[in-house]
Amino acid sequence: MAVVTDQGRNFIKLHSLLEITNERPYIWHNGNKIFFLFDPPHLLKSLRNNFLKYSVRWNDKQALWKHIETFFNIDSQQKFRLTRKLTTTHIHPHRLSRMKVKYAAQIFSSSVAAGISVHCQHKFTYRSDGHCQTLFKT
């Protein structure tokens, strides 16, 4: 059994009151273990919104929103685009578009990842030091 919620303040407070943690994401009620989960669409939007503000670092690598933005700027000028669904709204979401899951999902799609990979393999650089090539090279 599970309770699935968004990340509203009321649910965050409930998690705190019930002592829900990453280590123990459940409570016991009448002998049943009840898990508390955040719904994936809201998690995906939160991930995108955080990526708009902050870089992602792992090992000696870094991913920046600027990488996606630069890829879009290059791709959108092509006659045959690698990511035809990507629009300016994806790259510079306004208040209402930040609430739509499809924009977040399409940013993290396999076609965007493949497009960035293709650009990097063909030596399109997103920064003067060529950082993108070592970051996304497969």
Image (cartoon, rainbow, N blue to C red):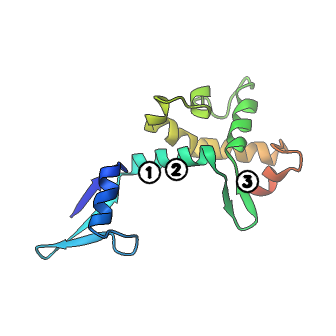
Q: Which structural element holds mark 3?
A: helix
Q: What's the residue at 57%, 41% (across, down)? A: 107
Q: How far apart are marks 3 and 2 (CA)?
A: 19 Å
Nearer-N-terminus badge (3/2): 2
Q: Is residue 41 left or right of residue 56?
A: left
Specify the amino acid type for callout 3: Phe
In this orientation, which residue lies closer to the viewer: 125 or 115? 125
> To which quarter of the image does residue 87 belong?
top right
Q: How crowded is mark 3: few (under 14 residues within 10 Å), some or many (20 or more)?
A: some
Q: What's the residue at 47%, 44% (across, down)? A: 45
Q: What's the residue at 80%, 48% (across, down)? A: 121
Specify the amino acid type for callout 1: Leu
Q: Residues within 10 Å of mark 1 (few under 14, many from 20)?
A: some
> To which quarter of the image does residue 125 belong?
top right
In this orientation, which residue lies closer to the viewer: 105 or 46? 46
Q: Residue furthest right?
A: 128
49 is higher (above) or lower (below) than 136? above
Provide the residue designation for mark 3.
Answer: 136
Provide the residue designation for mark 1.
Answer: 43
Cβ atoms under marks 3 and 1 closer than 8 Å: no
Q: How far apart are marks 2 and 1 (CA)?
A: 6 Å
Q: What's the residue at 27%, 65% (across, down)? A: 17
In this orientation, which residue lies closer to the viewer: 45 or 72? 45
Provide the residue designation for mark 2.
Answer: 47
Q: In this view, does 112 lie to the left or right of 25?
A: right
Cβ atoms under marks 2 and 1 closer than 8 Å: yes
